[in-house]
Amino acid sequence: MRRFIYGSQRGEGSVGPESGSEKHIEKRKYRAKIEVVGESDIVKIIYEALAPEIETPPNLKRVSVSAHRDRERYTIEIYSRDIPSLRAAINSYIYLIYTAIKTLETARETTR
């Protein structure tokens, strides 16, 4: 399993929070989970495509993000102090996932 939580590297095969960040996540009042389930190679590509966005979310003061992948499942957890920030982050990550999937579909169609 590979796991991302915004911040610096910690341990083999994972990116973890810098010291004190775990408390930062725990203070968040709202949480959402997005799961992508599919073929392991597709899930891996989506995971790698979104990694930069997971590692450095746009607004660390309002939103914290963690993600992990098991072969055929990619899970993104979003933590937020308020609902508008949570909604904005959900929309952003869903759009990024959608874009990655559409790009993969287009690539497959053109290689046929």
Image (cartoon, grey):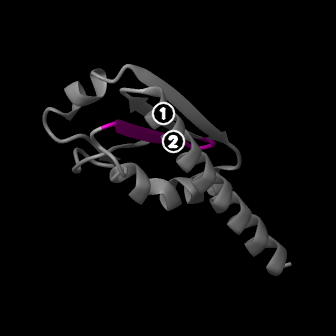
Q: Residue furthest front?
A: 84
Q: Position of residue 44 (x, y in %)?
A: 56, 54
Q: Residues within 10 Å of mark 2 (few under 14, many from 20)?
A: few
Towards the viewer: 30 or 105: 30
> Cβ–Cβ below 8 Å for labels 2 and 1?
yes
Against 69, residue 42 (above or below) is below
The C terminus is located in which quarter? Answer: bottom right
Q: Position of residue 61 (x, y in %)?
A: 27, 39
Q: Residue furthest bottom?
A: 111
Q: Main secondary structure of the magenta part?
A: strand
Element class at badge 1 = helix
Residue wearing tag 2: 88
Residue wearing tag 1: 84
Q: Position of residue 23 (x, y in %)?
A: 21, 25
Highlighted range, magenta: 62-73
Quarter location, residue 45: bottom right
Residue at position x 27%, y 21% in the image:
27
